[in-house]
């Protein structure tokens, strides 16, 4: 049973560029959440997708956008990259929405470096 | 917004020692989750707690959901070198907000052989 898979594992971009990160959820999961983890910090919630729609959003600017496909996989897009966008981007999948079932399984992350 | 405060920020212990870390919040959480993150990897769920006062074990790990629902602790008994990593507490933001987790800043654990 494949877990949560993310691609690519590492990425280097230049300021002002755009980037797309990809995530395939764990088999049987239909909800994908994205997190940004800066060095030395805990993950910060970006947004969540369920039924191909953004359901919840954290405190991130509109430069961060996403998409969920019919097969439940998801993309995270970041436009006009800033140096401060350098971080580990984590994808988490879960079943939802079901009250009380909040276990989220994380992928290994994509390390984005903006230069 | 809701914040989770973990302590200590880091721990340096000898192999075989027991470890205790905790997590507090200014607001109530209905679920507490404990994750471990190894370098270059995503967080892995260790223990999930759903009821105030609940005490749950997973091997050498034991976690408790505080009665006030504003705190939780994680204990590791007889630590081994592979326990090294960063331990995070997390909870669903807004109480029942499914899937949107708030994380603490982590406790870095180092185990000396």
Image: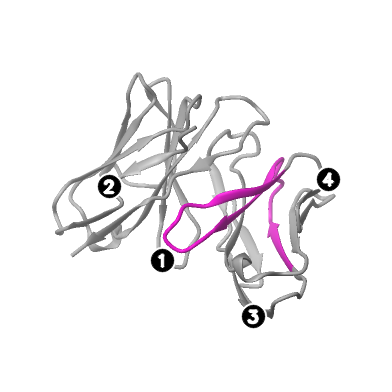
Q: Nearer the viewer, mark 1 or mark 2?
A: 2
Are the numbered discs 1 and 2 placed on the same chain, yes or no?
A: yes
Check the residue under mark 2 and report the chain it is in.
Answer: A
Q: x and y percent of residue B7 in the render?
A: 67, 69
Q: x and y percent of residue B15 in the render?
A: 70, 77
Magenta extent: B20-48
**Residue at the image point whose x is 47% and y is 54% from the top:** A43
The reply to whether callout 2 and callout 3 are in contact (CB within 8 Å) is no
Label 3 crowding class (10 Å Cα cut-off): few <14, some 14-19, many 20+?
few
In the structure shown, which secondary structural element does the residue marked by tag 2 occupy?
Answer: loop
In the structure shown, which secondary structural element does the residue marked by tag 3 occupy?
Answer: loop
Q: Which residue is mark 4?
A: B54
Q: Is residue B30 above or below residue A13?
A: above
The reply to whether callout 4 and callout 3 are in contact (CB within 8 Å) is no
Q: Which quadrant would residue B52 be assigned to in this image?
A: top right
**Residue at the image point whose x is 65% and y is 38% from the top:** B95
**Residue at the image point whose x is 67% and y is 69% from the top:** B80
Q: Which numbered tag is attached to residue B113?
A: 3
């Amino acid at each position: 049973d494949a877990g949560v898979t993310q691609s690519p594992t590492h990425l280097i971009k230049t300021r002002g560029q755009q980037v797309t990160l990809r995530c395939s959820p764990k088999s049987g999961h239909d909800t994908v959440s994205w997190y940004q983890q800066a060095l030395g910090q805990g993950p910060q919630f970006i947004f969540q997708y369920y039924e191909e729609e953004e359901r919840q959003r954290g405190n991130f600017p509109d430069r961060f956008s996403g998409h969920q496909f019919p097969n439940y996989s998801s993309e995270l897009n970041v436009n006009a990259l800033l140096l401060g966008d350098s971080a580990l981007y984590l994808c988490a999948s879960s079943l939802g929405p079901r009250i009380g079932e909040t276990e989220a399984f994380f992928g290994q992350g994509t390390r984005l470096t903006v230069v | 917004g809701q914040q989770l405060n973990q302590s200590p920020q880091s721990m340096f212990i000898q192999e075989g020692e027991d470890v205790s870390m905790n997590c507090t919040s200014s607001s109530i959480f209905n679920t507490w989750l404990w994750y471990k993150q190894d370098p270059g990897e995503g967080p892995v769920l260790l223990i999930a707690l759903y009821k105030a006062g609940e005490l749950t074990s997973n091997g050498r790990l034991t976690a408790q959901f505080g009665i006030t629902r504003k705190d939780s602790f994680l204990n590791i008994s007889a630590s081994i070198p592979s326990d090294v990593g960063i331990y995070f507490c997390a909870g669903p933001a807004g109480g029942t907000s499914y899937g949107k987790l708030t994380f603490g800043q982590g406790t870095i654990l180092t185990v000396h052989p």
